[in-house]
Image: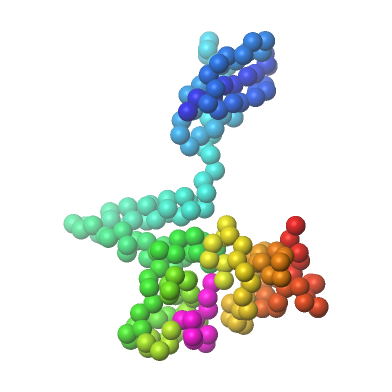
Amino acid sequence: MKALIIYDATGRIWNVTYGEDILPTGLSGMVADVPEGRSVYGIDFSGSIPKARYEELPKTEVEQISGKIDALSESINHLVTGSVMPMTVACSFIAETFTDDQAVQVPGLYPEWDGNGTAYKTGTRLRYTGVLYKVLQDHTSQDDWTPDASPALFAEILIPDPGVIPEWKQPESTNGYAKGDRVAHGGKTWESLVDNNVWEPGISGTEALWKEWR
């Protein structure tokens, strides 16, 4: 990727246009090749020819998570002499440390619910019919204790995609909306003002619990 950098005699950058390679007239200018994953933040005048200075672009949360997984997998592989630890094992280790907000961005790291006598520990996350759930208490699974029908054992994570505002659902006492969660209800969008919010937005008496967003 190319960048057109326009600067004055003091080295102050006036404009950076990515993808442009036509030099301007008037102010000093230069064209620089910008490495992938970086942006221009200044100009180096230490040499006879000005050079662009670069900085790393901030990584998205998903990229940070992927980086952690890669690093952990590499570390584990070095520790296990003479064998290669499967990537899925490394992923499962680090997935246990994620917050709910991070977990819903990578649901594929979590296993499908198994109703055939599987021992589940409190806090374990798993998928069922495409929905991510958290285990609320230690138990051994049964085929009739499905996550969607066993609120004492499982809590649905209600914001499955942080980039999409879902319709409000009546939560249980174990999985109320977190402060900052946004939901659609009654033709409006609402933002939760408190953690563990189980109240319906927009009804009388919830002014301190929800606010209309935008």
x and y percent of residue 38 in the render?
51, 34
Residue at figure coordinates x 65%, y 24% from the top left: 15
203 above or below 5?
below
With 15 as the anchor, is 141 left or right in this view?
Answer: left
Count of marks overlaid on the render: 0
Q: Quadrant of residue 195?
A: bottom right
Q: Residue furthest left?
A: 82
Residue 154 in magenta? yes
User: Which of 51/195 is in front?
Assistant: 195
Can see residue 42?
no
115 above or below 46?
below
With 90 as the anchor, is 21 left or right in this view?
Answer: right
x and y percent of residue 33 in the render?
48, 24
Residue 211 in magenta? no
Residue at figure coordinates x 64%, y 10% from the top left: 25
145 above or below 193?
below
Residue at figure coordinates x 37%, y 61% from the top left: 91
x and y percent of residue 105 in the render?
49, 60
Colouring method of the image:
rainbow
Task: Pick the quarter of the image with the C terminus.
Answer: bottom right
x and y percent of residue 3 in the render?
54, 24
Can see residue 143?
yes
User: Which of 63/93 is in front?
Assistant: 63
User: Which of 64/148 is in front?
Assistant: 148
Q: Quadrant of residue 158?
A: bottom right
With 41 as the anchor, is 67 left or right in this view?
Answer: left
Magenta segment, which residues?
A: 147-157
Residue at figure coordinates x 70%, y 78% from the top left: 199
Q: Residue furthest front?
A: 187
